[in-house]
Image (cartoon, rainbow, N blue to C red):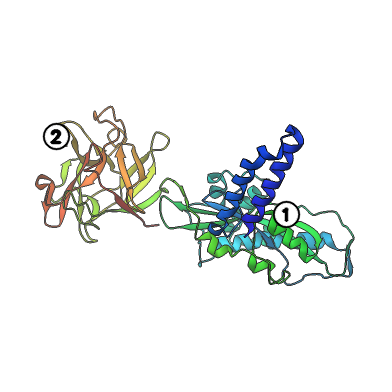
Amino acid sequence: MRINENLNQLGYLLIKEIKKNNKQTHSTLKPIAAIVSLLTSLDLFFSSPIMASQDSSNLTYFRKLRRGTTDYGPVTITDSTFKHEEASIENYEYCHQENTSSREFSMTNEVSVSGVVKAFDIGATHSNTFAHISTEAERTGNEIKSFQKQFVQVSEKKERTIKEGQFLAFYSAVKVCCFTVNRGKRQYSYIPASDVFVKPMFPKDIRSLIDEGLHYVDSQSWSSVGHQDMKFDDISELLKTLKPLNIEVPIPYGTYKIKTTKHDPSGMVAGWGLASWMDHGAKRNDSSSWVAVHQGEKWPCRWEIMPGKEEGTFRIETHTHVAGRQPAGFGLSAFRFGIGNRNSGSTRVAAHNGTRWPMDWKIVPGKKINTWRINTTDHWDSGHCAGWGLGAWGRKVGDTVRNDSSSWVHVHEGDYWPMDWVLEKQD
């Protein structure tokens, strides 16, 4: 196995270096040799090389380009400039197509290639260039090829002699990053990780590329020019072993339906929608209404999530709801006075017009996948403190039940009574 060869070489070099520099006797080197021998004996546990640049959330592999047009010797190639450019474009197109395929990964508004490059701290120029032109291609709906031609760094024109038994190899390193967004589904992003290498190769050179163990060597692209006894790597299988890096992103601004999830401590069921009405017993005064959750689709409202006054916060405002006589623009609020003060650990939630009484809210990922917690911030006028979470409770908390189909909404301190919420984007 390949790790066996690497460790044997390591042991040989280690002993050689100690002999040269410290003039140790052979007997004093036995413990080192024994350690190397022990490590070598562990080869039954490994079938892949140790990759120096890899962590558990990503891997890098060499991909052979121009698979359909391989030039074999003996021949002299004089148009390498054009072919280098062609190969570079192919590599960018390949990564872009992998990122937008429905098979494994579909690029969405959740996170862009630029977001992945930033999250994985990838700083190479070609990677950032790829992120930029991918964004442009997504934004305009055009193919990436039209953008890539503006950025390819073309090598100087050079005559290459390909000997008998050689072929002209074009290959590049590709980094695959495994991630989730707000602990959602497992996703992969393919990013060019090097310039395109162009050089004549014998089959033995491929074996050296494998044995060096710098990166994996893709079986799909390289097997056509290699020998049957060469151990290439099945990248699709290796991807399954990666542990995804979670990328936390804020909720996008826009119009939402905000719905409950199942909350066992209170007996609340999933799927009831956040609502605010100036009728049906929910009117607080001419400027505000009490907020509830209601089953079905008729009585829940749509809500506009927009930037708050402070960075990293949100305002959550009503849309017009004809059946409940609710005007648009009332902001989600919580007041620590009057009947809004439920007890020392919870506050009734209202929607209020204007800019003074509505609160800035923190919206953070919930405990369940694809859910959110909606938390208070400090609000001087209402006397409310930060960190209390929005909640709606069922039959087990009787004083908050409105009727069989609805409950009043509160915020509560701590982590037990606040709820995870589903935010369904409407536009």
Residue behind mark 2:
343
Q: Amino acid at mark 2?
A: Asn
Q: Earlier in the sequence, mark 2 or mark 1?
A: 1
Disc on res. 150: 1
Which one is in front, 123 or 237? 237
Among the 4 quarters of the image, the one containing residue 42: bottom right
Label 1 sits on what residue type? Answer: Gln
> At 55% from the left edge and 56% from the top edge, which residue is drawn?
189
**Secondary structure of residue under mark 2:** strand
Q: Which of 363 and 320 lies nearest the eye of the viewer?
A: 363
Q: Position of residue 113 (x, y in %)?
A: 56, 52
- Judge from the rendering whether residue 213 lies leftward or rightward of residue 352; answer left or right: right
Task: Name the quarter where the N terminus is drawn.
Answer: bottom right
- Whole-number angstrom distance, CA of label 2 to CA of label 1: 64 Å
How many badges with numbers are in the image?
Answer: 2
Quick one: SS at disc 1?
A: loop
Q: Residue at x 89, y 70 (%)?
A: 74
For residue 384, side relative to residue 184 (left or right): left
Say which quadrant the C terminus sits in: bottom left
Q: Would residue 143 be visible to someone looking at this image?
A: no
